[in-house]
Image (tube, rainbow, N blue to C red):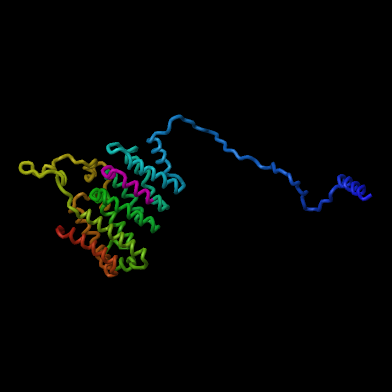
Amino acid sequence: MGSSSKKRKNKKKDFQKPKLKVGKARPKPANFTDTSFRSKSIVLHQQSLATTAPTATSQFSHHVSLLTSRTDSQRRDSLSYLTTAISTRPTNAPLQQPVSVLLPKILPLTLDGSHGVRTQLLKLLRALPPEDVEDHIEQVLLYIRAGITHLAADIRSSTMDLLTWALEYGGNALVSCAGGWVKTLKSLMAMQGWPIEHSPGAWSSGRASFGKSDYEDKALVKSLNIMAALLRAGFEDPSEGGGPEAPAQGFPLTDTGLHLISKRTDCFAHLGLFGPARDEETQIYEGREDRQRIFYRRFQGSIGYGLETAKQEGGEVGRAAASVQKVITEGMKDFEEAD
């Protein structure tokens, strides 16, 4: 009796419709399989297939084109590749691209906002042949002066490293090019807060502040050391003749090097025959006496006053200022002011 009623209930259960509550979905069975997913696929509209790998020259040109990428890491990696490619080339092999083509592409990165890009740029410039860079030092100086007077402190610091490299590789070429002597000195003085004109009114309004923080002290010491290197290169008496490796010759071959053809590509640029008229700032000062004269007339008073103020701070700033003063004293000791 009991078993028959149980069987009837089980049969009715198969035909009963379950009552669903409002807002709740129907429960899924235990063996439910979700088939709502979609497989992801990558579609290539244009695909280039080649049996040969790209040449080293094409890869070099490709990474040069990537220097204008919007990604900091891409610009840094491209500079790293170019540095490795130039450094590992055979000894007598030419560059993959001439320096005259390469410099306009890499020099704008002097003002790049990424510290890693600027650091890698300096490594790339150090890998370039110094004799090729000397012919384009005026172009390099344009970006160096722009970076020295930049508003960002880290860009100014990186640009000072770039100026140090330029002085190490071609100090005489740097101070002898158009604007290399006067404009570079003005940029360094502007970065330190020193006015060009030596007058009490100028110093009362634009006097440099020293010793505010450790960072400012380090930046000031760095700029003073670079100023000392620049003045040393400007006051240095370049060797005449064929250079230091030229053998000593006596009569009648004395001063033979003065009559040889110059190795510079623009040996007559100082005459200004084919360009616009130059003013005092953009003039080419090839001779040591010319640089001494313009320094005495325009900079010696202001720089001397600024160095005296810096030496009163003592410490590293005072020692750096004393080294600059020593360079000026030794470089100007044989200068005689013309009447």
Name the residue located 42 percent from the left edge and 52 percent from the top edge.
114
Farthest residue, direction right: 1
Find residue 294 and report its horizontal and vertical position in percent.
22, 56
The quadrant in which residue 182 appears is bottom left
For the residue pair 158 and 24, the one nearer the viewer reads as 24
Find residue 245 and report its horizontal and vertical position in percent.
15, 45
Image position of 289 (left or right of 178)? left
Label tally? 0
Find residue 145 and report its horizontal and vertical position in percent.
33, 53
Image position of 41 (left or right of 88)? right
Does the rendering let one see residue 103? yes
For the residue pair 107 and 81, the one nearer the viewer reads as 81
Farthest residue, direction left: 251
Image position of 238 (left or right of 33)? left
Q: Is residue 318 above or below residue 277?
A: below
Instruction: Report the span colored magenta.
Output: 118-133
Q: Quadrant of the C terminus?
A: bottom left
The quadrant in which residue 258 appears is top left
Q: Main secondary structure of the magenta part?
A: helix
Find residue 312 and report its horizontal and vertical position in percent.
27, 70
Name the residue located 30 percent from the left edge and 58 percent from the top edge.
188
The quadrant in which residue 212 appears is bottom left
Q: Is residue 65 above or below residue 326?
A: above
> Is 128 colored magenta in this rendering?
yes
> Is 17 colored magenta in this rendering?
no
Image position of 64 (left or right of 248)? right
